Image: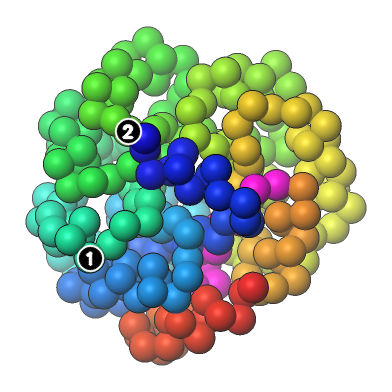
Amino acid sequence: MNRIKQKLQEDKKILSIYFTAGYPSLNDTVKIIQDLEKSGVDLIEIGLPFSDPLADGPTIQASSTAALKNGMTTSLLFEQLKNIRKTVSIPLILMGYFNPVLQYGVEAFCQKCEEIGIDGLILPDLPLDVYQEEYEPIFKKHGLINVFLITPQTSDTRIKAIDDASEGFIYMVSSASTTGTKEGFGPEQAAYFERIAAMNLKNPQIVGFGISNTQTFQQATAQTKGAIIGSAFIKHLTQNGVDGISGFVGQIR
């Protein structure tokens, strides 16, 4: 069974951490992954840096720019991760934009993911219909779960279509803004969380955007399976380097 599906079956709230590969330093990727697992994180999203990250706020954009300047590429990331399954067992997801995947070659990219032990992909700019028409057989052939995003503006009809097409979890974007730390969730987010919970979707939801501490983690997971922390963790890396990861994770839950 895919590691993502196994993890989702556990009777616990999922804490997922996102970071940008090649940041703060080019060769930090593997150490960050290993330290996150040791610190009790349930799932890791490894960001593939891209020159035009439309959905990302300033913190993740800056980390992506720095990683590219450091020399991070798709091929180098695969090289860094080639032995990752010798030391890490939790689910690993690559998250990024579809252009680098297309440049690498979709079949070749998915095959490399399978070889390394990547469990899924999050590609926010790959539309559901394009995925189903052109790429779904390739993803499935290589055992990859494709994670789709929904937002407060996504219609019920589209949410149901995404739920039907999904096999792992649904990435539930908490607001229509870009990524970044928010000071808690307001009434709009609360209503959105309640609306999705009432739909009784077959796939669990994991909330992203705006989670940075225990309070926002608990708010986000009250009616969902888990939450993702990205910008707050990258700020921690910016300020502290790769030291103190366990301290950061420990203060979330």
Secondary structure under tag 1 reads loop
- Residue 105 screen position, x and y as percent: 16, 30
> Dots 1 and 2: beta carbons under 8 Å?
no
Q: Is residue 101 above or below residue 209?
A: above
Tell whether 12 sits left or right of 118.
Answer: right
**Colour scheme shown:** rainbow
Q: Is residue 160 visible?
A: yes
Kind of residue indicated by mark 2: Leu
Asked whether residue 223 is drawn in magenta, I would say no
Against 140, residue 27 (above or below) is below
The magenta stretch is 224-233
Q: Residues within 10 Å of mark 2 (few under 14, many from 20)?
A: many
| Precedes in sequence: disc 1 or disc 2 | 1
The residue that label 1 is drawn on is: 87
Q: Quadrant of residue 126?
A: top left
Q: Quadrant of the C terminus?
A: bottom right
> Circle 2 sits in a helix, a strand or a loop, which is it?
loop
Q: Nearer the viewer, residue 76 or 65?
A: 76
Residue 227 part of the magenta segment: yes
- Of residue 224 and residue 151, the one placed in the foreground of this image is 224
- Residue highlighted by disc 2: 144
Residue shown at the point (38%, 74%) measured from the top left: 38
Front-lying residue, 188 or 34: 34
Instruction: Specify the amino acid type for callout 1.
Output: Thr
Report the mark closest to the observer, 1 or 2: 1
In the picture shown, does residue 121 fall above or below 40? above
Q: Nearer the viewer, residue 221 or 184?
A: 221
| Left or right: where 229 falls relative to 240 | right
Give me the residue at 84% from left, 50% from top. 190
